[in-house]
Amino acid sequence: MSLLDATSLPVLIVAALAASCCALIGSFLVLRRSALLGDAISHGILPGIVVGFALSGSREIVPMFIGALVAALGTTLLTDLLHRRLRIDGDAAMGVVFTTLFALGVVLLEVYAGRVDLDPGCVLHGQVEYAAIDPASFAILGWTPPRGAVTLGVTLLLDLVFVLLLWKELLITSFDGDLAHSLGIPPGPLHLALMGMTALTTVASFEAVGSILVVAMLIVPAMVATLLTDRLLGVLLAAQGVALASAGLGLWSAQRLDTSVAGMMAVSVGGLLAVAFLLAPGQGWLPRRLRRLSLAIRIAEEDLLGSLYRAEERQAGGGGIERPSGAPPHHPAWLRIGAGLRLRWRAEVVKSDRTLTLTQRGRGRGRRLVRRHRLWENYLSDLLALPASHLHDPAHRIEHFLDEELTRRIEERLDGPERDPHGRAIPAADHEPGEEER
């Protein structure tokens, strides 16, 4: 079965539109650190939807939205009341409100389900599988779209208009609420408008992904996006990509496992979050560990080069020296071995029997490291008045992170000292002939 055949394509369109709507509004909820509020609204509006069904006797979007909007505002106001008046923790107050309202919605759903065309499974779990047999009452260029696609398409358009009209306000309030307040951007009306759009998006997505699974579509694509980028436009685009991918993966896997499309969409987007958590270039677990490992190896390399250079200084420029027993002692053995192998591969040291010798390139790198170390000791001594016994450890920590420009500025600030506070010569800044920069 193909994703583009006559049966699957309407399902894919409706699922993709529902995921896209939720991801667009959900991105702002996540950026504003209101993800739990989105969860509360998506559950708390259930009684409003059921009451709208009961009063109108149909599944038209207008009465559903009015009931959902009232319930969403009620969820927000009740949460605020419990938090401010009764001094209940914000998350706890939110949990109390949305679980109570959701339970009330389930009870009302069972009471009114027999009186109107209202399927509890549709509201709770979604019925996107039936998109192909629920066409709209009109055709576009000879093609009749699914009814759900029309509703979700209009909702997506309204969401886009909302974002474009309030782009500046949403941008500022999403990243810096204090700045927005100082600029005169009213947080209250904007918050209520966002809650209203969340309610509209949730109502429109109910038939596709249901009341329970809409939470995943609201929150998880935006969470994945924030792991990939830290710019608002990038977050919105990445969230859309994740949402569309989850729709395709959810339908494909549901067809092969013969299970719920909405459920597999939530599973798929959860899997994408796990992949992003592991592999995201900026914040992924594996890249962070690799960067830390690379930094640890570089520090171990420079410590070894520095110790070899200091040993050559003590021997007045003698040749080979014995490998130090610790370089320095706080590096584990595997790290010292890895650093030594990299230095030999980069031709910065050579090994003969149990003897390590600096090459010209390695000597230059070690000299620059020692120069940074001793200049920083001078800086701590002259400008911060630290005693000589307190200079080595902080200088050893900072020497690995000083670049040449900052080192030059430190030297100029100190008027070009020739010796450190311990009386040791500070290596010159000029390079030996043929020496290469790091």
Image (cartoon, helix red, strand yellow):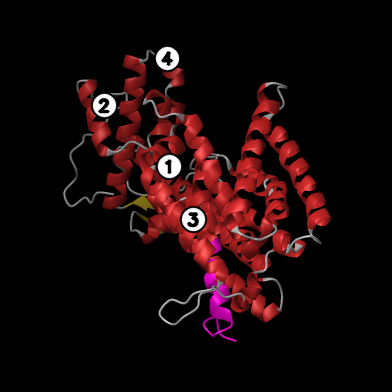
Q: Amino acid at mark 3?
A: Gly
Quickly name the residue at label 1. 303
Q: Residue at x 40, y 80 (%)?
A: 141
Q: Which mark is residue 410?
A: 2
The first of marks 3 and 1 along the sequence is 1
The first of marks 4 and 2 along the sequence is 4
At label 1, counting other C-alpha atoms closer than 10 Å, the crowd grade (few under 14, some 14-19, many 20 or more) is many
**Outermost residue to the top:** 385
The first of marks 2 and 3 along the sequence is 3
At label 3, counting other C-alpha atoms closer than 10 Å, the crowd grade (few under 14, some 14-19, many 20 or more) is some
Spatial distance from mark 4 to mark 2, Cα to Cα? Answer: 19 Å
In the rendering, at what x and y percent does residue 403 appear?
Answer: 29, 38
Q: Is residue 321 visible?
A: no
Quickly name the residue at label 3. 338
Q: Amino acid at mark 1?
A: Asp
Spatial distance from mark 1 to mark 4, Cα to Cα? Answer: 23 Å
Image quadrant where residue 262 sits: bottom right
Spatial distance from mark 1 to mark 2, Cα to Cα? Answer: 21 Å
**Quick one: SS at disc 2?**
helix
Q: Amino acid at mark 4?
A: Pro
Spatial distance from mark 2 to mark 3, Cα to Cα? Answer: 32 Å
Quickly name the residue at label 4. 387
Q: Is residue 152 visible?
A: yes
Q: Amino acid at mark 2?
A: Ile
